[in-house]
Amino acid sequence: MRIHRVELEHVRQIKQVTLDFSHPLSIVAGRNGTGKTAIQEAILTAMFDRRKEDRDSLVSRFDPDSPPTATLHLSRGEPEPTIHLHRTLTDKSGEWVEGSSRIKAKGEALKKVQESLPMSADAAALLLWGRQNDLAAVVQQFPPDGHSLLTAATIQGTGPDPKEVMKALEDQIKESKRTGQRPGALTRAQQRVQSLDTELREARDALTQLEQFQEQYRDARAGRERLGRERQQAEQEVRRLERLQGLAEAWLTAQDEADRLQKQAEQWEGLDDEIRRQQRAVTGVREELDRLQSQYRVALDASLADGIERLLVRLRLADKADADCRRLRQELQSRPRPEPRDEKLLQQFQNQRNDTVNRLDATGLRFEISAATRTARVELSEDNAPAREIALEPGRVHEGIVGSVVIRLDDVRVVARGKEDVSSLKRAAQRAEREIAALLARFNAADEDALRQLADERKRIADELAAAETERARQLRDDTLESLRAEVETLRKRREASPVTPEDREAWGRTVLATEAQLNTQRQVKQAEVDKEAKSLKQLENRRPTETQQGQLHTALGQRRAAAAAAREAFVHESPQSPPPSKELRDAMRAELARARGRLNELTNQFHAADKQVDRLSADLKHAGPKRSLGSVEADLDDARAELRREEVLQKARDLLKERIREKIQEMSESVPRELAARIGANLARLTGGAYAKVSLNEAFAVDRVGEGGDRAEHWQPHQLSAGEQALTALGMKIAVARALAESGNPVFVLLDDSLVSLDPQHRAATESLLVDLIADGRLQVILLTCHADWASDWQKRCGEPVHVIDLAAEAEYYRTPPALDFVLRNTSAV
């Protein structure tokens, strides 16, 4: 991965900045506090999913509502950027644009970075882009995913990836074994062998089945012929039994019809006597009905008369109550009278007046003014009202109750005040008096007692009206006066429509009869009896035969007897040994015929089943036998087995090749620590001028020992080195790792946080020379952050085009001028 340009917005004190990293070696120079660390942290956060506190630390305190964003222009080694990564640094959202592909789903942009750089944020911070104060930690603890990264890079080198080759072999193995709708070559060969095995087995079974079908076909034809003969015999027996049964049925039917006609002739002979008996029964019930009709008319007349009388009494009482209601309602409306709410209002006003007077009497100032011997004129002001002049006559007293009073007589002025101001109480008392007066005037009452008398009078009239209305409702019930009058008229018309004759009164006038309803029920029941007896009589008369019918009956009777005799003779002729026809014989013959028909049906079904079996076996014989000859199937099976053996050998060869590659990968993986140690030793020898040259790594890739150069045999553990020597060792390791990754064919950029500034001039010159050599082939890109702009400019002058210096203060737009720049400006002005 190569970085070409970085664009940041709202990152800590930086409002906006764009940095060009297109050169092989870029130096970002800026004084302390100008934002170099912010740029380093923003790049790391843009490319990895870091902790929330690390992301939140990038929010600007000068604009906390604007989220910090970063846009990285990247490539996979091309001279121009081909990938654009835009990130909001406070969350996992981002956008990855590569060619025509655009990915914006949450977290997907980070996955694309991880695919391009198979390394975690912690490993990148230590090995490639870490802070200077964390650089020495790589000597003590190499990040675990750095092991895998270096191992993969070493195994792959610049050629094909052996793991990809293994994966291709595994895919070929799986492809060959694949089943389903698109099976692989091995599966197809296995399936073809199985299919041909099955076909050969089925062909042999088909030959055996053909012989069985031929034997079954011969047996089925013989059975069908036997059943055909048995069915013909059963058909003849059924036809014989059907003829016998028909003759027996004919004789019995003719005999039954003759017996029925004989019985009918006997019934006709006794029909006249039965008709006369029924006529007498009809006459008797009709007389009983006439008697009940007479009793019902008398009872109905009495019931109607009683109902009319009761209705007239209710009508008189309802009329009187209705007249009382009209009179009382008219009296109630003759003049206005107070209602209960008016009485309650009067009581309320009286209470207000009495309460006000009592409070006035309790709290007001009482005064009296009188003249002793002669008339005097004084000025009087009550409760701060305008003064008025009054004349005081001897023997007469002017008095009042006030809150305050002012009396002036000539030059004498008397002022008196009570406990409180009573003017509001006096106004309230006057207002209550006015309300009472208005209420009395409304009902034209002389005084308050008269008003109460009017209220009592209204209540009395209202009570009497309610009683009259209750009485009227009790008499009317659910009726009205008009409906009662109409009902009386209806009952009178019903009485006139059903008059009682003198004979009826003479017969039943002194007899205690049942009620009209009971008699009506009895009358209806008796009428039903009359109708029933009359209907029976009519039926008997309808059954009376005419002379023609009687003659026809005798003729039919002779014919039935002759037909019965002829049928009996025919039956005896057909079966001389059988007994004479009878019902028992007919039932026995029916049972025998049913058994014969059942036997015939059973034989018919068996014959049809045998016929179907013969047809089925005949069709099966046409399709029986193998589809192909046994020799053809056996030849194809031999070819398929040979093809299967070839595929199995090829599959074993793939497995063997995969195992050999795995062993080679293991062998190369074991050499990674030695090669990395050699690279670190070479870098350290160049950085120290040969003072240190040998580095040993343990299994975890951490530095185990550092050896001196030349013929010296001293070895030092990391903690025994000075801080500067540890930093040089870590820098050598960082450069070795980056170079190893770059040589795998993937461009890599390294971020150095002022890694050279703490070195002495000799070590720094050696480091500068090493870095310039490392970027010569274009595989490695170096970005250096430093606060020493003068040293960076001097290096650029010495090395020329490969070194590109960026003045961060000049490129960045800040929310406010950083304190470091203020310090420089003040000192410059002072100088």
Image (tube, helix red, strand yellow):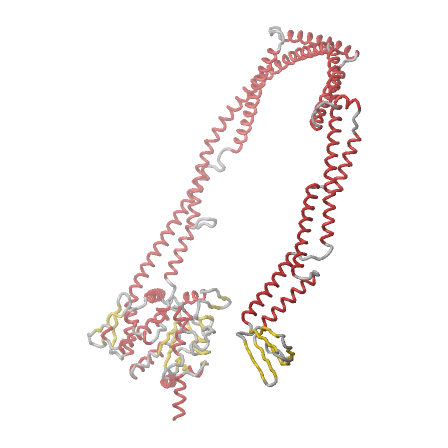
Residue situated in front as seen by the camera: 707 or 440? 440
Residue 538 seen in the current view: yes
Count numbered badges in the picture. Answer: 0
In the picture, measured across the screen, residue 432 lies left or right of residue 106, that is right
**Residue under the point 34% across and 70% down:** 740
Which residue, as the protein is rendered here, is positioned at the far bottom? 831
Inspect this view and state whether residue 7 appears.
no
Q: In the displayed structure, does residue 726 sit left or right of residue 83?
A: left
Q: Position of residue 635 (x, y in %)?
A: 44, 41
Q: With respect to residue 309, does 638 lie above or below? A: below
**Image side of residue 681 versus residue 9, left or right:** left
Q: Which corner quadrant of the image does residue 557 belong to?
A: top right
Across and down, in percent, residue 227 comes to 55, 20
As displayed, is residue 817 above or below residue 830?
Answer: above
Q: Quadrant of the C terminus?
A: bottom left
The percent position of residue 669, horizontal first and vertical second, equals: 31, 63
Q: Return the residue nearer the eye: 626 or 494.
A: 494
- Of the 4 image quadrants, the one containing the N terminus is bottom left
Q: Residue 212: give x, y in percent of width and height.
A: 47, 28
Q: Residue at x 33, y 81 (%)?
A: 757
Q: Nearer the viewer, residue 75 or 421?
A: 421
Give left or right: position of 516 versus 71: right
> Where 540 sits versus 355, above or below?
above
Q: Residue drawn at (41%, 47%), measured in percent from left and top?
A: 643
